Amino acid sequence: MNKVVRDGLVAVLYSPGFGAGWYSWNSEHPEILFDPAIVELVEAEKWEELQAFVTLKYPDIYTGGLEDLQIEWIPVGTQFIIEDYDGNESILKQHSTDWITA
């Protein structure tokens, strides 16, 4: 899977706005978390081009979270999950949480 890596950090795409999740509503396509072309378009704030690109490359995904996309830079190798509350996504990193063992 292609990823954007800079200074030991990986670009992870997520949608923190309420209404629709980016990955959480399209979890069968994990590549949309890291797609380098999407990262580039989000960084450049080229929202119309982004909509056109995503519609062509991923015609079967729900794009409701597209307009709220943000990038979080996470250290390479960090395990994480995307949590979703009413479409509002957040990134939970394993090392930043006190996990409880039964």
Image: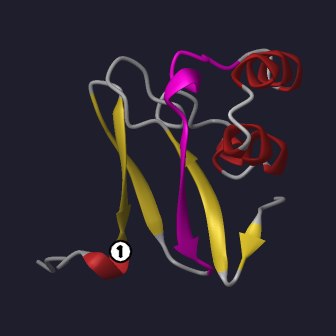
Q: Give the range drawn in magenta.
A: 61-76
Q: In this view, does 27 lie to the left or right of 54?
A: left
Percent x, y for residue 81? Answer: 42, 57
Residue 90 left/right relative to 62: left
Which image quadrant: the N terminus? bottom right
Determine the secondary structure under disc 1. Answer: helix
Residue 67 located within the stretch drawn in magenta? yes
What's the colour scheme? Answer: secondary structure
Instruction: Find residue 45 and report its horizontal and vertical position in percent.
Output: 68, 34
The residue that appears at 55% across and 22% down in the rendered structure is 67
User: Residue 23 occupies which quadrant of the picture?
Assistant: top right
Q: In this view, does 71 lie to the left or right of 10?
A: left
* Rendering coords of residue 32 (x, y %): 69, 41
For residue 73: magenta? Answer: yes
Nearer to the camera, 34 or 7? 7
**Circle 1 is placed at which residue position?**
94
